[in-house]
């Protein structure tokens, strides 16, 4: 019964406020996305809310290297295929995440002691296999994820310096984008990172890389601002930052938005913090929608029930726009307001 009750309450909230967020986003020519997991597609309100409120879907984990390529000659497509099928059934745009990352790589890869030449071949064939499998189904990919440290230096990763695929500086990123373009010429190719929403050392490094790539014809279409935020976000230069990437011809997408708040021992937030959280959501969405380069805003999960935040940032939680019972939070209303206000 609790499931039925919460569905009724959600339906009532929507009826009172008119269109769903995906309808509003569509009316403004943008996508409102969520990271999703096939694990939850049969769970209570999850599929209902996902299909009703979001017109973009990105696998939270199922297209990462480890989950999708668990053994050298084995690709595990089933979970991601099921998400793609769900997205297609519900008219959602699918976004792929991520082909090249330092994290969530399989043990056969990280413990393999491969030479640069071997790693080069592994990465090229991984990108080709995954992108070709989803060709025509994924609108775009986070080709490379989180390659910079916060101070703008290159992050140590298996692809870069151990000893990597054998290329200096941003060379491995460039190579990955070239392989990605060859694998699926129609997919939009993104560089994605966190702590890059403001003008800062990390976004400066990204900017320099994109400028260089554009000048030399290296294929790149967009940048992702993940935006895993707290109640004290650094948003003073957020719009100026979007603007400078727009001027480089980049699509700019908000890819992993959540705003974590302090929670008590039972995981509950102070209602006043949820109001502050809502203001931040509204500001992020309003800021992005000022730019024609901004094509999508995506939250990192459907419900607080399954968010990655409490497991990683202890003492915080309730970071998303639906609570653990799939009820819309003040942040939901704030996103709605921001869409309604957009031209
Ligand atoms: O699926 C396995 C399960 O079989 C196993 O029993 C269980 C035991 O720990 O782990 C499960 O995998 C977990 C997976 O999430 C799926 O739930 C991994 O341990 C866990 O590490 C993984 O966390 C993900 C994290 O990336 C890994 O770094 C989070 O769900 C995911 O939200 C998070 O997403 C990243 C983005 O990709 C990139 N930007 C930052 C963002 C947050 O870290």
Image (cartoon, rainbow, N blue to C red):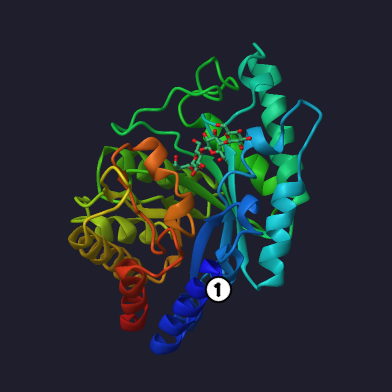
Comparing 14 with 80, the one in front is 14
Residue at 19% in and 50% down? 232
105 is higher (above) or lower (below) than 67: above
Q: On the picture, is 318 further left or further right than 210?
A: left
**Where in the figure is residue 119, as x and y percent of width and height?**
66, 22
**Snapshot quadrant of residue 16:** bottom left
Characterize the local packing of mark 1: few (<14), some (14-19) or many (20 or more) Cα atoms within 10 angstroms. Answer: few
331 is higher (above) or lower (below) than 153: below
342 is higher (above) or lower (below) than 201: below
Comparing 3 with 171, the one in front is 3
For mark 1, what is the residue?
4
Comparing 314 with 82, the one in front is 314
- Residue 310 visible: yes
As helix, strand or loop, the secondary structure at mark 1 comes to: helix
Residue at 27% in and 47% down? 263
**Where in the figure is residue 315, as x and y percent of width and height?**
28, 40
Comparing 183 with 210, the one in front is 183
Residue at 52% in and 30% down? 103
- Residue 255 visible: no
**Where in the figure is residue 3, as x and y percent of width and height?**
54, 68
Q: On the picture, is 115 further left or further right than 198?
A: right
Please identify the quadrant where the N terminus is shown: bottom right
């Amino acid at each position: 019964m609790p499931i039925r009750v919460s569905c009724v309450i959600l339906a009532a909230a929507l009826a009172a406020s008119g269109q769903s967020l995906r309808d509003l986003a569509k009316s403004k020519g943008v996508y409102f996305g969520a990271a999703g997991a096939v694990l939850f597609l049969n769970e209570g309100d999850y599929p209902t809310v996902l299909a009703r409120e979001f017109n973009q879907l990105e696998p939270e984990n199922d297209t990462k290297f480890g989950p999708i390529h668990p053994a050298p000659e084995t690709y595990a497509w089933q979970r991601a295929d099921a998400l793609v099928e769900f997205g297609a059934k519900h008219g959602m745009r699918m976004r792929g995440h991520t082909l090249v990352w330092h994290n969530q790589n399989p043990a056969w890869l990280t413990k393999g002691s491969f030479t640069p030449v071997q790693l080069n071949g592994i990465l090229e064939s991984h990108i080709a296999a995954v992108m070709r499998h989803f060709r025509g189904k994924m609108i775009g990919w986070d080709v490379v994820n989180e390659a910079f440290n916060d101070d703008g230096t290159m992050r140590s990763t298996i692809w870069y310096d151990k000893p990597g695929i054998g290329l200096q500086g941003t060379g491995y990123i460039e190579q990955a984008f070239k392989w990605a373009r060859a694998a699926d010429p129609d997919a939009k190719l993104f560089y994605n990172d966190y702590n890059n929403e403001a003008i800062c050392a990390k976004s400066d490094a990204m900017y320099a890389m994109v400028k260089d790539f554009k000048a030399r014809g290296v294929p790149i279409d967009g940048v992702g601002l993940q935006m895993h935020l707290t109640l004290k976000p650094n948003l003073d230069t957020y719009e100026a930052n979007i603007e400078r990437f727009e001027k480089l011809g980049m699509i700019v997408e908000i890819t992993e938005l959540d705003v974590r708040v302090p929670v008590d021992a039972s995981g509950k937030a102070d209602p006043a913090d949820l109001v502050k959280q809502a203001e931040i959501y509204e500001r992020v969405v309003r800021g992005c929608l000022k730019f024609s380069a901004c094509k999508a805003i995506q939250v990192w999960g459907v419900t607080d029930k399954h968010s990655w935040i409490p497991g990683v940032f202890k003492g915080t939680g309730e970071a998303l726009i639906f609570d653990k019972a799939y009820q819309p939070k003040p942040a939901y209303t704030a996103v709605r307001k921001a869409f309604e206000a957009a031209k």
